[in-house]
Image (spheres, rainbow, N blue to C red):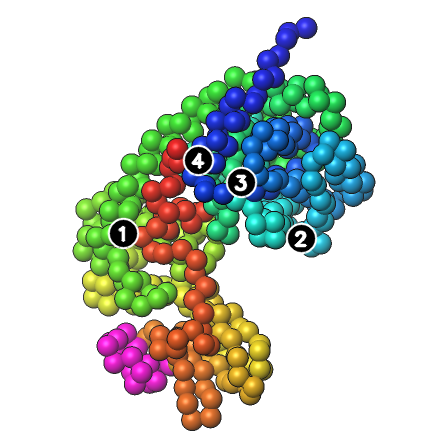
Amino acid sequence: MVKIDIALEPDFDAILNHLREKSSQPLRLLVGCSGGADSLALTLLCADWIARHDGAMLALVVDHGLRAGSELEAEQTRNWLQQQGISACVKRIGNTSSGNILAFARRERLNLLCAAAEEFAADAILLGHHRGDQAETVLDHLARGSHALGLCGMQTYTHYQNRLFLRPLLQQSPIRLRAYVQAHRAPIIDDPSNRDKRFRRVRIRHWLWQSPELINHALDIAEQARHLAGVELAASRKLLNETVTQPLYGVLCLDTAGWCSVPKTVQYRTLGSLIRYLSGREFPPRRKQIRHACDWLHHGESPQITLNHVRLYRQQQKIWLYSDTRKKPQSLAPQQTLQWGAHWLIRNPDARHISVRTMGRKLWRQLMPEFVNQAFLGETCPVITMLSDTQNPYFDTQKYFQPTLQVQIGADLSKSGLYFDKIYPIS
């Protein structure tokens, strides 16, 4: 039998020590643990690191509830971890999926992790993705037609819902991780859905099992894509800084004069990021939709188009971008809240009902004289009516209106909403 080196601690320690150096307090770490070999290895490594340093950790076992027996397996994993002196809890996904099961499970799992991290006051959320997962991600994105940024694969440090996610095992082989767990006599749970070939990602995983050399090829693709993405993102930020302004919160103004001199791929990336920011969605529009929007930007005859509920309105060489939020008048009861598009959370702190409606062009001209030529913005902007008084979000002192977009323009140049300088790479 071939002897497997399972001394994973030095590589793991280097990453967590780097994170600890950036913190003035002992680290509090939340570890996502499914009971599989990879996440168990991550949990054991984290527990060993915490035992040698000040800090605290919590292992969160997520029960997706998608198959019979998952609840018992989650309890089994939690009980074994607690027997090892590791704090652990189980959270069950309460929703049901009506579409892509894998995408649903991932989204709900991340939401549970973020909620638990808030409750635990965690500095970082640790995930157990390894080299094989990285190769699967790259090949899956390649099959979906992703370009440079999508082919970069997963990063060691990323953000989601303003939470730091850490993947300290990305350079590790799944064989070494399983051997590490087996050496600790941990009960490994193998999810049968990982062998269901109805899913493209599972088929890719099967190909990698049959031809392990594909992992190295996929990782080479990711490395080259990172270099290309770095160049593309730098050009995108330059284009954004030179041609895009934000005269009002949630409203962008794009000067098309400077767009003709840059490659189309840079235009696509920049425009996609702007629309992603304004729509509040996790991902930008599809590449085909972005191409159509860029063609309209240069040659379109219609005065406006809408993409992902973001309206693009042409005024000579200027393109105004804003959320296309059209709502009927609504009554807001005391202490009630209302989400208005992706931009505003409207609250009623008063003891009486208030009326919320779209401002309209006429009222916009009265209240916003500096932007009277942009009266079309009033078609989606909310306004509150209280007896003879009115309040709009640009004059309110956050008594009624609270901004909800979490990132600042100029920083949002990736699907994850990371600050530009931290997208690629973080080291």
- Tell me the element at label 3: strand
Amino acid marked by disc 3: Leu
Q: Secondary structure at mark 4?
A: helix
Residue 32 on image: x %, y % = 62, 39
Q: Is residue 80 left or right of residue 227?
A: right
Real-space Cα separation, disc 4 to disc 3, in angstroms: 10 Å
Position of 111 relative to 176 (above/below): below
Report which residue position mark 2 lands on: 98
Q: Residues within 10 Å of mark 3 (few under 14, many from 20)?
A: many
In the rendered structure, the answer to whether residue 372 lies left or right of residue 65 reads left
CA distance for labels 3 and 2? 38 Å
- How many discs appear? 4
Q: Dot 4 corresponds to which residue?
A: 21
Cα distance between the residues tagged 2 and 1: 38 Å
Magenta residues: mostly which secondary structure? Answer: helix
Residue at 57% from the left image edge and 50% from the top image edge: 121
Identify the amino acid type marked 1. Answer: Leu
Q: CA distance from mark 4 to mark 1?
A: 33 Å
Looking at the rendered structure, the kind of residue marked 4 is Glu
Whichever of callouts 3 and 2 sits on the residue coming sooner in the sequence is 3
Inspect the image, locate mark 2, and give the three-letter code of the amino acid beneath it: Ser
* Residue 364 inside the magenta-drawn segment: yes
User: Which region shows up in magenta?
Assistant: 360-375
Determine the CA span between mark 2 and mark 4: 44 Å
Asked whether residue 38 appears in the rendered view, the answer is no
The residue where tag 1 is placed is 240
